[in-house]
């Protein structure tokens, strides 16, 4: 059965740091196994170039809009790098969920949160900490009604 566009691609969004709201996640058109991080938000300065529009798919991965590269964390250590890797649709290293109450992007079955060092403009996966502002992310243009049903679509 072929999924509709909405079922396949739930969100088209920009991911903005709450700790440093001028910074957004930017994959900068990087290739496989390349680390990416934070850059000044293009939405705030249209003269900037980058890759800051992302899609949360029904595979429960995050990918730059229009590409088949996914956010991937293969290291189990704390402060593990987030790299791009070809999307495989099997979740695992590419599984992400957004927790709107905590404003967390949670990675994988061994949950860790997307964290950042805004001064160095890097991101990584780290132990979730409710008191950490650097683990909070604001999604631009998110559909909270669709997000509340996200666990019921695609692979579980």
Image (cartoon, rainbow, N blue to C red):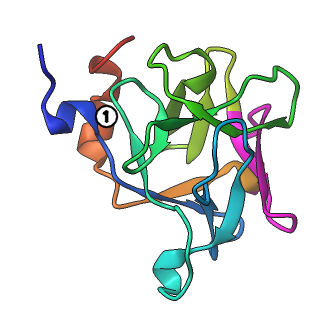
Q: Residue 145, located in which quarter of the rendered image?
A: top left
On the picture, is 15 further left or further right than 10? right
On the picture, is 78 further left or further right than 86? right
In this picture, is 110 found above or below 61? Answer: above
In this picture, is 88 found above or below 37? Answer: above
Q: Residue at x 86, y 68 (%)?
A: 119
On the picture, is 140 further left or further right than 28? left
Q: Residue at x 86, y 37 (%)?
A: 79
Residue 108 in the image: x percent, y percent?
Answer: 61, 21
Total numbered labels placed on residues in the image: 1
Q: Residue at x 54, y 30 (%)?
A: 86
Q: Quadrant of the C terminus?
A: top left
Residue 23 in the image: x percent, y percent?
Answer: 65, 70
Is 117 a magenta residue? yes
Of all residues, the one furthest to the front in this rendering is 31
Q: Quadrant of the N terminus?
A: top left
Residue 80 in the image: x percent, y percent?
Answer: 82, 33
Q: Residue at x 47, y 86 (%)?
A: 46
Is 19 a magenta residue? no
Q: Quick one: 4 or 145, which is closer to the camera? A: 4
On the image, numbered disc 1 is attached to which residue? 148
Residue count near mark 1 (Cα–Cα under 10 Å), binned few <14, some 14–19, many ≥20: few
| Tag 1 secondary structure | helix
Q: Which span of residues is magenta-colored?
A: 113-133
Residue 61 in the image: x percent, y percent?
Answer: 47, 31
């Amino acid at each position: 059965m072929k999924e509709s566009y909405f079922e396949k691609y739930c969100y088209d969004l920009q991911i903005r740091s709450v700790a440093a709201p001028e910074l957004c996640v930017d994959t900068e058109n990087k290739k496989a196994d390349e680390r990416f991080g934070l850059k000044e938000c293009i939405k705030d300065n249209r003269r900037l170039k980058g890759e800051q529009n992302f899609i949360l798919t029904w595979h429960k991965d995050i990918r730059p809009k229009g590409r088949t590269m996914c956010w991937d964390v293969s290291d189990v250590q704390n402060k593990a790098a987030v790299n791009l890797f070809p999307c495989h649709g099997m979740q695992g290293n590419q599984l992400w969920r957004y927790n709107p109450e905590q404003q967390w992007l949670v990675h994988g079955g061994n949950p860790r949160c997307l964290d950042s060092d805004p001064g160095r403009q890097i991101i990584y996966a780290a132990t979730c900490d409710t008191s950490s502002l650097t683990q909070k992310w604001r999604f631009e243009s998110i559909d909270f009604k669709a997000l509340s049903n996200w666990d019921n679509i695609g692979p579980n």
